[in-house]
Amino acid sequence: MEPFENALPAGGSAKPVQNPAQNYEITRKERLLLPCTLAFCVLLVNTLFTYGPTAGLTAAVFVWYALVLSFTGSRPLLARPNRILLLADLFLALTLALGSNWYFRLWDLLALLVLLPVHAVGLSGAPRLPWYRPMMLWERLCLLLSGLFGRLGAAFAALADPRGEKRRWVPSLLAGAVCALALLAVLLPILASADALFAAATADLQTWLQRHLSIALWKLFWGLILTPFLFGLLYSLRHPKPLKSAAAPALPAADALLFLLVLAVLDALYLLFLAVQSAGLFGGPDYLAQKNISYAEWARSGFFQMVGVTVVNLAVVMTALSLSRRTGRSWAALRVLAALLVGESLVLLASAAWRMTLYVSAYGLSFKRCMTYWGMVMMALFLLAALWKVLRPDFGFCRLAFPLALAGWLVIHCVPVDYLVAKNQVDHYLSGESAVIDTGYLLYGLSYDTLSQLERLDGSLICRSGGGYQRLDILLAARRADAQVECADWRTWSLSAWLAAGGGN
């Protein structure tokens, strides 16, 4: 992405504010956005730091982009990668308010913690490396840290008068109000404990302070702490400074013979492994019984290991293709062995999927097994991309792998995983294929999406709950009550909880 020239907005000339360390070009727009940044920081403390990745974070992400685009303008969105990543980030944030699966929420939070800064720094135009170069992550991390910690004076410069005279009453009034309220919250209970009559006279005031003011002051305090860092980052987006040396270092070129031996050994190992495994696949239970191995034991073991092995194989292939010197017969032989390794890895994935299917048919689905299926599909796509790079060495693997990873993560959010898991488990139990059903896992290990399927069971079914046992219908009523509590607060509301609480009826 080419750097954008960030012109100052019409309607206000920049007034440089002198600072011993550096000069800050502060306009009226920055001064207006400073309190907005403080409000965002308080919102962040009030949502993410209080309730975690819930619907409150959804609102915070939308406000974040409103702030970012206020600083950068809409011109960076003319680049298609910026528009696509904006939509992807907003969709990920929206899923926090749609579903109630905490596994997805945690992973979405981790994804947003990476994607939001990467995108924001890219909107500034400061990065010199394109988005599909892996080293761009390091470059944007450096720019992010520079904005967070290298522009701390921007927030204080924005408090200065345009004529150069300090407007001391603004920070003084704010600091005085916070200190006065903090002292009131601390000293009032002390005085109340010293005099019973005073305690009785101020009982209602103390209760109000304990319920509202103390928590609000704590959130405001942390919001004030965060504001200089966030405002400095936002200021750096409007006034970007590219790194002095942003060029990616050239990868060392090694002789292809170095990797030929590694690939040849791996190819031979996997050929032997697949030959032995095919006996189990086609020999069936009778062949395994001769080896004193039960068919169920053989089916439920190994698929996670084989998925891990394919990850290692992909790394080996990409390392060999990236670091080998592309000349001579050694390079041609390396490409052949790399293609063979990719093909063997695809067969390993197919074998793992087959064994997983055998296991699921006997024991039913779980969230972990569903995500394993998803991981197998993603690994197969990455391996096909690696195979294309073997055929076309100049092809940029990350240029396809990064969008594939993001698209795959967005697609899995469109699949009702918890609902499918509960339906599969309940179907197995009602059909008699399974004699037991783990209601505790379906009730409390997954989201509210499982409740509609659990209601298909007999409500008088006795289930384990905590340290004791309880009827299923009572546990379902308790879970729906939990959903109602979550829906009562906009910061924890979710469509999944709202439907479970009866909002869709």
Image: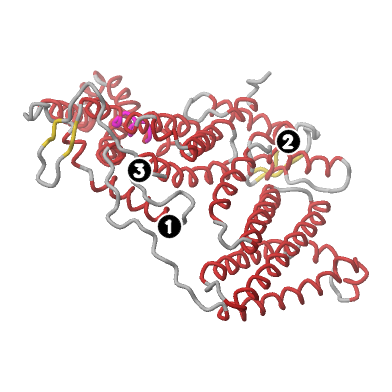
Which residue is identified by label 3?
Answer: 3
- Where, by quadrant of the figure, is residue 386 drawn? bottom right
Answer whether residue 42 is magenta in the image: yes
The answer to whether residue 492 of the structure is visible from this angle is: yes
Which residue is identified by label 1?
Answer: 135
Foreground residue among 286 and 451: 286
SS for dot 1? loop
Residue reaching furthest to the right: 286
x and y percent of residue 233 in the render? 30, 41
Label 2 sits on what residue type?
Leu
Gap between marks 3 and 2 measured at Cα: 60 Å
Mark earlier in primary sequence (3, 2): 3
At x 83%, y 62%, the residue is 296
Mark earlier in primary sequence (3, 1): 3
Label 3 sits on what residue type?
Pro
Q: Which of marks 1 and 2 is in front?
A: 1
- Which quarter of the image is occupied by the N terminus? top left
Q: Nearer the viewer, mark 3 or mark 1?
A: 3
- Whether residue 433 is situated above or below residue 164 in the rendered picture: below
Answer whether residue 225 is magenta in the image: no
Which residue is identified by label 2?
Answer: 472
x and y percent of residue 67 in the render? 35, 30
At x 61%, y 60%, the residue is 392
x and y percent of residue 273 in the render? 76, 74
- Which quarter of the image is occupied by the C terminus? top right
x and y percent of residue 430 in the render? 85, 40
Foreground residue among 238 and 499: 238
Q: Nearer the viewer, mark 3 or mark 2?
A: 3
Which SS does the magenta portion mostly show?
helix
Instruction: Read off the magenta span.
Output: 37-44
Q: Would you call the spot at circle 1 few (<14 residues within 10 Å), some (14-19), or many (20 or more)?
A: some
